[in-house]
Amino acid sequence: MKAGNGTHFEQAYNAQAAVETDSRLIVAARVSDAPNDKEQLVPTVQAVPAIVRAQVEAVLVDKGFYSAAAVAAVEAGGGPTVYAAVEKTGHHRSVADLEQRPEPLPPPASGGPVERMRHRLQTPAGRERYRLRQQTVEPVFGIIKEALGFRRFSLRGLAGAELEWTLVCLAYNFRRLHRLSLVVG
């Protein structure tokens, strides 16, 4: 993969995790050697066990995962609705973000998939649903990096990296289950 400012390459892997919004448990984990996430949406959704995937209503992903073909593939046949950012936005809220906004006009019939996705995210329901992404998956990766101290793979080869990522995600889930049992118990 290209590294740094793009002037050199490094042996690296791209780790993915599908996280359930209520419990913040990892329901699927996978590793690829693809340099970006554009082609990772469909295989990551398919990595979620079928019994869980049947209950999924929405998939929340950042701009890196968006491609019209991937969204169409996930939503085909009554699949979950994908909420994917199509443009880069700042991480900080502005006054405009806090103001009450009217329901946006639907995109024109001639509008493409990007316009339809942009509209989906601009509706009040879409904004509320997509907001869950930052409080669901981002903390998981932060905990894995900071609390568990996992920042790089130790095993070589894709199979080794997949095994290592599975163990890291399992350790995270055990930690999370323990936290959840303390809250409930």
Image: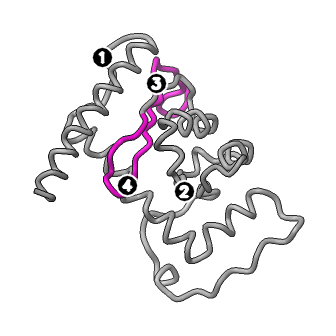
Of labels 1 and 4, the one closer to you: 4
In the rendered structure, the answer to whether residue 109 lies left or right of residue 133 reads: right
**Identity of the residue drawn at 50% across and 87% down:** 99
Query: Which residue is at the front of the view, 99 or 60?
Result: 60
Residue neighbourhood size for the residue with mark 1, other residues' Cα within 10 Å, grouped as few (<14), some (14–19), many (≥20): few
Q: Which residues are magenta?
A: 1-28
Cα–Cα gap, marks 1 and 2:
36 Å
Give the mark nearest the N terminus, 1 or 4: 4
At 30% from the left and 17% from the top, the residue drawn is 154
Are discs 4 and 2 less than 8 Å apart at CB? Answer: no
Q: Is residue 159 above or below residue 105?
A: above
Measuring from the top left, give residue 137's x and y in whole percent: 39, 50
Q: What mark, if any, has residue 154 been given in the picture? A: 1
Residue position for label 2: 57
Q: Point out which mark residue 26 bears.
A: none
Q: Which residue is mark 3?
A: 13
Mark 4: which amino acid? Answer: Thr
In the image, residue 128 sits, relative to residue 99, either above or below, namely above
CA distance separating discs 3 and 1: 11 Å
Residue 184 vs residue 84, the one in the foreground = 184
Q: Residue at x 29, y 25 (%)?
A: 167
Q: Nearer the viewer, mark 4 or mark 3?
A: 4
Circles 4, 3 touching at the beta carbon (< 8 Å): no
